[in-house]
Amino acid sequence: MKKQFNVSTKAAIYNNDFSRVLVIYTNKSINGKWRYGLPGGHIEDDESPDQAMIRELREECGIVVNNLRHTDFFIHCTGKLILAFVGSVDNDDLKSQQNELEGIPKWLSRSEFEGISTPIEENYRKLVLENWPKK
């Protein structure tokens, strides 16, 4: 059995013209209600944070990011350390390789993202909005 650390990865991924951001719509939360999150997950004992982020994006969304870069870190409301990444994709087709085990990947416009009324980790909101390129 592989070890999981109390460190996780999350990413703000934008489509090629930066008109949409990738989110995960999931019922995995503290209270079991559906909510929005960002793609990412735990770092396994045999991988670097970058490798974990690449694996999670492939598993959860079926995407490959060309320009993924580490941008920040923060403490999640559950106490986990989150290593934050930013990137964009040329092809925005989504296909969970886990049958949406972690949630449903979907693209949201900036106005849709800003209008999210279901709970979202405040640091996720900040990561997305602070790194959304200005047109």
Image (cartoon, rainbow, N blue to C red):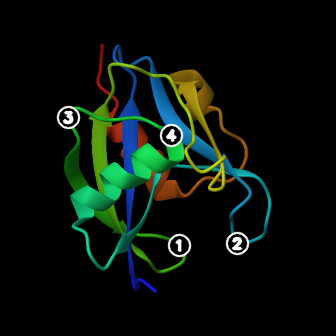
Where's residue 53, x and y in %? 33, 54
Q: Which residue is mark 3?
A: 67
Q: How far apart in space, not on screen, are marks 4 and 3 (Cα)?
A: 16 Å
Q: Residues within 10 Å of mark 4 (few under 14, many from 20)?
A: many
Looking at the rendered structure, which numbered label has been put on residue 30? 2
Q: Residues within 10 Å of mark 3 (few under 14, many from 20)?
A: few
Q: Which residue is mark 1?
A: 77
Report if residue 126 is visible in the image: no
Q: Secondary structure at mark 4?
A: helix
Q: Are marks 4 and 1 in contact (CB under 8 Å)?
A: no
Q: Earlier in the sequence, mark 2 or mark 3?
A: 2
Position of 87 relative to 77 (above/below): above
Q: How far apart in space, not on screen, are marks 4 and 1 (Cα)?
A: 24 Å
Q: Earlier in the sequence, mark 4 or mark 3?
A: 4
Q: Earlier in the sequence, mark 2 or mark 4?
A: 2
Looking at the rendered structure, which numbered label has been put on residue 61? 4
